[in-house]
């Protein structure tokens, strides 16, 4: 992860964190299954079709949704397109550097993308304009503004919150061409997938890891659940293995947490 | 509907049973210039893997003073899929490269090679669903072939849900048209999971079934991996060659005595 860059000082800190966790405590006093304060603001941008800003502790992520017109994928000519992209903006951390997306930002965008897609957040067949030629394209751009761990959950919450408030421009289809009518209608969002990320430190699973904890972690697992409690995406990351029992435990923790957070996002609209 | 009940009558698109792997063939030592290599065929998947190292790290700033680094590259050939794909690495390739590294790292005694790198290059020559799993399976054979000490072999296969049923080792069609896909990599001796991803919709119970089924699949793959490693050291010779070799040994013994 972003870990190895932190240097000597953090090695001392890691020992302290590990020691605390083995005695059942976290450095910031949270319980192992406790999130930091989550704040969700929606409609924070005027020029985007949908937007949301999510704070989890000091982690801050902004998502802008732009909905436009484009060509469909070759294998799904009659369906709209959803694209997720994540930018690790250099202002977010002294360890983020400008440049093309690295594997961490690609992984992040793909986990969020899979969560939305697997859950079936939108009916893609309704986003068709001229079959095989033009469809609605939903671009979800994830902007990391401040890094203090757990970027995946913050990004996933922001993405679904932004999508839920998105509007879709209405186009007029005439003689094989589309014309904007200037009218916008609400985008129909069918599901609210929630990602819950845990890290394993020692023998414990901790939800919502801080930057310090991510540095010490052995392995990380993200479980995304949709409204009915079904699992829609899982991603294990990090260089240590997990046992079957640990995975089962992670899924159970995620189930409880996801329904708590879902009500927050569903209520956070305005 | 548990998989057990449908075992008898239920056949899949390609005629397999629900818990049956595709035909699997692994060969080790297939490249002469690599330190270790392996070739795998799993269904219509054809993947070749080369391992280089432990060797000096380039660029040097990537080296670590206390441990070796594992570097991977998963790449699909332009002709490996139905529509030609660009040879430039896609976002998918980048992610698979990353999870492949995480899947193999726990098995290697990397700490024995400070300031060195072990590089694994995998080329997918033909893709038929489940390429990441087949790549991981082949890579661990190639690592052994390179003589790199390992804690265990890593075997990988996917499980998923197709037509409401939990099935092992999804083929391309089942992967694209199924409800869910769970690729898993497993170290059978250590009983640890090193790769876990999931895509689609599953209940928690179905997900657990998938993991159990994958573990069984990985154990079968593990046997094939072991055979592939052993086979490299078995040399088949004709009777004539054996006679010749015996004569040679006899002659040199006589020379020694003189």
Image (cartoon, rainbow, N blue to C red):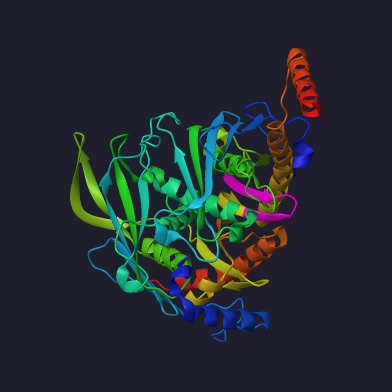
Residue A171, position in %: x, y? 23, 47
Q: Residue at x 40, y 35 (%)?
A: A75
Residue A190 in view, yes or no: no
Q: Is residue A269 magenta?
A: no
Q: Nearer the viewer, residue B189 or B250?
A: B250
Quadrant where the C terminus of chain A is found in the figure:
bottom left
Q: Nearer the viewer, residue B23 or B36?
A: B36
Q: Is residue B187 magenta?
A: yes
Please name the predominant secondary structure of the magenta segment in the image.
Answer: strand
Placement of A181 over or under A16, stated as above or below: above
Residue B110 in view, yes or no: yes
In the figure, residue A267 lies in which quadrant? bottom left
The residue sitting at the bottom extreme is A29
Q: Residue at x 77, y 35 (%)?
A: B7
Residue A100, position in %: x, y? 31, 56
Q: Nearer the viewer, residue A198 or A63?
A: A198
Residue A83, position in %: x, y? 36, 51
Q: Which residues are magenta?
A: B177-194
Placement of A62 over or under A21, stated as above or below: above
The residue sitting at the front extreme is B258
Residue A20, position in %: x, y? 62, 84
Placement of B115 over or under B217, stated as above or below: below
Placement of A78 over or under B73, stated as above or below: above
In the figure, residue B108 lies in which quadrant? bottom right
The residue sitting at the top extreme is B240
Residue B91 lies left or right of residue A118; in this view the side is left
In the figure, residue B204 lies in which quadrant? bottom right
Q: Nearer the viewer, residue B153 or A235?
A: B153
């Amino acid at each position: 992860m972003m870990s190895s860059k932190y240097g000597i000082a953090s090695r001392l800190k890691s020992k302290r964190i590990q020691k605390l966790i083995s005695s059942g405590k976290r450095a910031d006093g949270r319980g192992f299954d406790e999130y930091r304060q989550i704040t969700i603001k929606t409609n924070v941008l005027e020029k985007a079709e949908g937007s949301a800003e999510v704070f989890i502790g000091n982690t801050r992520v902004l998502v802008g949704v732009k909905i436009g017109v484009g060509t469909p994928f070759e294998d799904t000519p009659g369906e709209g397109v959803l694209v997720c992209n994540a930018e690790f903006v250099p202002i977010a951390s002294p360890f983020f550097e400008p440049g093309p997306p690295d594997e961490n930002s690609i992984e992040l965008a793909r986990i969020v993308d899979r969560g939305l897609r697997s859950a079936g957040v939108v009916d893609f067949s309704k986003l068709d304009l001229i079959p095989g030629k033009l469809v609605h394209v939903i671009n979800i751009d994830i902007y990391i503004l401040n890094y203090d761990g757990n970027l995946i959950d913050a990004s996933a919450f922001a993405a679904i919150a932004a999508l839920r408030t998105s509007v879709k421009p209405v186009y007029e289809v005439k003689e094989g061409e589309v014309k904007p009518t200037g009218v916008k209608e609400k985008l129909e969002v069918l599901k609210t997938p929630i990602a819950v990320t845990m890290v394993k430190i020692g023998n414990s699973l901790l939800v919502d890891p801080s930057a310090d904890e991510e540095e010490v972690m052995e392995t990380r697992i993200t479980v995304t659940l949709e409204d009915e409690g079904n699992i829609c995406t899982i991603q294990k990351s990090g260089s240590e293995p997990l046992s079957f029992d640990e995975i089962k435990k992670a899924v159970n923790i995620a189930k409880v947490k996801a329904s708590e957070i879902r009500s927050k996002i569903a209520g956070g609209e305005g | 509907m548990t998989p057990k009940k449908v075992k008898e009558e239920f056949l899949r698109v390609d005629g397999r049973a629900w818990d049956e792997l595709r035909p699997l063939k692994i060969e080790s030592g297939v490249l002469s210039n690599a330190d270790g290599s392996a070739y795998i065929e799993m269904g219509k998947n054809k993947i070749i893997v080369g391992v280089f190292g432990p060797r000096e790290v380039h660029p040097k700033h990537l080296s670590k003073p206390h441990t070796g680094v594992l570097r991977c590259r998963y790449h699909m050939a332009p002709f490996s899929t139905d529509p030609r794909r660009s040879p430039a690495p896609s976002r998918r390739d980048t992610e698979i490269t990353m999870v492949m590294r995480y899947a193999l790292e726990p098995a290697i005694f990397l700490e024995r090679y400070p300031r060195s790198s072990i590089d694994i290059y995998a080329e997918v020559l033909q893709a038929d669903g489940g390429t990441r799993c087949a790549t991981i399976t082949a890579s661990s054979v190639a690592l052994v072939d390179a003589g790199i000490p390992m804690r265990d072999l890593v075997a990988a296969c996917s499980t998923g849900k197709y037509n409401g049923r939990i099935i092992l080792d999804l083929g391309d069609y089942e992967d694209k048209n199924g409800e869910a896909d769970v690729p898993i990599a497993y170290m059978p001796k250590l009983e640890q999971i090193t790769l876990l991803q999931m895509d689609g919709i599953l209940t928690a119970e179905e997900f657990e079934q998938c993991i159990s089924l994958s573990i069984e699949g990985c154990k079968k793959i593990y046997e094939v991996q072991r055979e592939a490693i052993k086979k490299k050291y078995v040399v088949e010779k004709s009777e004539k060659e054996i006679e010749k070799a015996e004569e040679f040994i006899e002659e040199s013994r006589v020379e020694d005595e003189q």
